[in-house]
Amino acid sequence: MRGRFGPRDRKQQKTRIAHLTTTAVVCGAVVLVLFLAVPAVAQHGMHPPMPDQRFALTVRSIESGADVIEVPLDLPSPTMPSDFSQHISLPNGKGAIHAVRYLPRAVVDQTVEAGTGEGAGPAVRVSIEGPAQSFERWLLGHDAERNRLQSLIGTWRYQAVADKSSRDLLYKQFETELTRDPVIQVRSEAGIVLREIPAKPGMTEKLAESGCTLAVVKFLPHFAIDDKKKTPISISEKRINPAVQVRVSCGQERFDRWLFSRFPEYTPGGVTPLPVPLRLDCPVGSERPIPAFVIITTGGTQQEIWERYEGETTARSLSAGQAVPIANSSYTFSVAKFVASGRLVETYRADESRRAVPAVRIETADAEGLPQSTWIALGEKSIVGAPGSRMVVGFGNWRATSGGGHP
């Protein structure tokens, strides 16, 4: 869900925040997350597509972790529903994607069908109720692209573990994910994390992989640009927009860069890429306190709800249909249904409500060569099967060039 910005205070009026922040709490070490384009509560939707807007599909291999391709969609019009046919071949002969249907304004209908085998796993349906709006969403414990929900009043994650020891480890991560020390990840070209270096100013490390040296120059928990001095500053001690300045020295060459935890793909336009891929891994907080919940299933039967709010973490058992108050709001939520093993089926339909978003339907073949149809909303990703591989397919705005601008 995109952030909502209120009036700026005096301190903020003196600065220009270089990279916009949202109200979401970003997941740390517990799980991979997806920021859902269809929010739960306090929905404000998004602007309808513009006549000159262009969209693209991005495809990343789960096995290698690398971005494989980014292909603009050949839509007849971004503002009109259309059936079209665009064939996108995947590299290395790993199958193809066929884009067939586009809706400029659509909402999702979700169901989970009980079953086993590939693509099946535990799922819960979260129901949020309040005076102005109600909302339901399925969360999949086995799918890193479908296990999280966020809104302006809270965040939810769903995880399923086999035993108590796994549960205890996960709970410890949940307790410390916003307070752990930031690190700089050194990655391979395929996106695999090779090692982690503390993001502490003054730290230096020899990068044997490239023969270069990494130096940590400065860390700012809330990065902004001072309008008068035109220099980076931190406008608070909260980790709202954490950034680290690094210097990579390779022989006579020197590269100075800012790495942003919220925008890991950001690269200034016209700048030579770093000789080794680096990312800042730092917990990101919210400007105002909102509760974070984790729904956890242990051993396929025991349900718990974990909550973190204003620095305090609690854990308690959870029964089906039990209403859980959402702190600092007049809403409650409950787990309306639990499925021990099932597959999510999502279908988008045309809608003119404020919560409608652009969506595209693709057709692929799974690992066994069987056809599958998948809808993806703008800003979302979905895991699809391919012969001999699995891919994460995303639907987003097309970037005309690979470098420059915000991701």
Image (cartoon, helix red, strand yellow):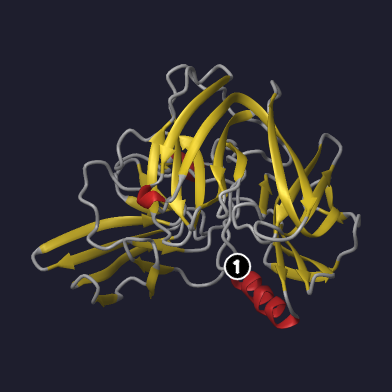
* Place of residue 351 in the rendered image (x, y in percent of width and height, measured from the top left): 70, 23
Residue, x 63% and y 51% (percent of image)? 288
Of 369 and 191, nearer the camera is 369
Badge 1 element: loop
- The answer to whether 64 is drawn above or below residue 233 in the figure is below
Residue for badge 1: 30
- The answer to whether 402 is drawn above or below residue 189 in the figure is above
Q: Is residue 162 visible?
A: yes
The number of callouts visible is 1
Taking 254 as reference, is 127 left or right?
right
- The answer to whether 268 is drawn above or below residue 108 in the figure is below
- The answer to whether 243 is drawn above or below residue 57 in the figure is below
Of 375 and 285, nearer the camera is 375
* Place of residue 6 in the rendered image (x, y in percent of width and height, measured from the top left): 60, 36
Of 241 and 134, nearer the camera is 134
The kind of residue tagged 1 is: Val
* Place of residue 15 in the rendered image (x, y in percent of width and height, measured from the top left): 41, 42
Taking 381 as reference, is 134 left or right?
right
Number of other residues with Cα within 10 Å of mark 1, as a class: few under 14, some 14 to 19, many 20 or more: some
* Place of residue 75 in the rendered image (x, y in percent of width and height, measured from the top left): 47, 22
Residue, x 74% and y 40% (percent of image)? 41
> Quick one: which residue is furthest to the left in this view?
252
Residue, x 24% and y 53% (percent of image)? 273
Locate the N terminus by quadrant. top right
Locate the C terminus by quadrant. top left
Taking 241 as reference, is 188 left or right?
left
Residue, x 65% and y 79% (percent of image)? 169
Q: Is residue 153 visible?
A: no
Q: Quadrant of residue 102?
A: top right
